[in-house]
Image (tube, rainbow, N blue to C red):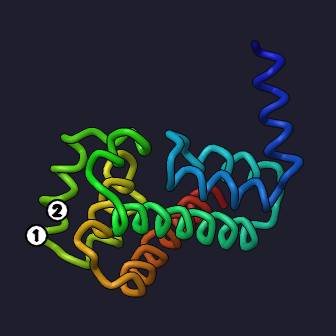
Amino acid sequence: MQESYFRTVEFWFELGYWGMFLAAFLAATILPLGSEPLLLALLYADFNSSALLWAATLGNTLGGITTFGLGYLGKWEWAERILKISEKQLEKAKAIVEKYGIWTALLTWVPLIGDPIALVLGFFRLSWWKVLLFMFIGKLGRYWFLIYLTS
């Protein structure tokens, strides 16, 4: 088992910036995956911080807008079945979106509630380009802050 784990880590390192993009994308969609550990590991391995910032931000934003799209097209049941988002998470996200509107797209990077927020923004059929813009800003800020803390 331990050997398999190291192969997985090697796999992500071999993919480099594309691996960062893919991990960030998947972290914002269907997998319970965090992209931050890979970002920090790649930074520690002397990958270019600017390139990692853009790969992570773009991947995570595209993943988030994919989740938004599922909400736009979907049903509550899809969130539970496909995205493994609980009804409690959805209700919490719904309350936040109802209170703060489009501004909640800035919070789509937050663990546990970010994906449900993106989904609910889609359910409410908010403007996709505004969601994309605020989502991008929030995710860029998160990755920039992590990189700043490690440099």
Q: Is residue 90 left or right of residue 71?
A: left
For the N terminus, give its image quadrant. Answer: top right
Give 78 or 130, whichever is nearer the viewer: 78
Residue at far right of view: 14
The residue to which callout 2 is attached is 96
For the C terminus, give its image quadrant. Answer: bottom right
Residue at image point 54% right, 50% down: 27
Compared with 12, 20 (above or below) is below
Image x and y of residue 86, in percent:
27, 39
Determine which quarter of the picture holds residue 12: top right
Q: Is residue 107 left or right of residue 64?
A: left
Give 76 or 134, whichever is nearer the viewer: 76
Say the numbered circle drawn on residue 99.
1
Which three-letter amino acid code belongs to the residue tagged 1?
Answer: Lys
Say the numbered circle drawn on residue 150.
none
Compared with 144, 34 (above or below) is above
- Give the Cα separation between the discs numbered 1 and 2: 5 Å
Task: Name the secondary structure under disc 2.
Answer: helix
Residue at image point 83% right, 55% down: 16
Residue at image point 32% right, 54% down: 116
Residue at far top of view: 1
Task: Name the secondary structure under disc 1.
Answer: helix
Badge 1: few (under 14), some or many (20 or more) residues near its Cα, within 10 Å? few
Q: Is residue 54 left or right of residue 106?
A: right
Image x and y of residue 114, in percent:
36, 56
Which three-letter amino acid code belongs to the residue tagged 2?
Answer: Ile
Image x and y of residue 133, in percent:
44, 83
CB contact under 8 Å: marks 1 and 2: yes
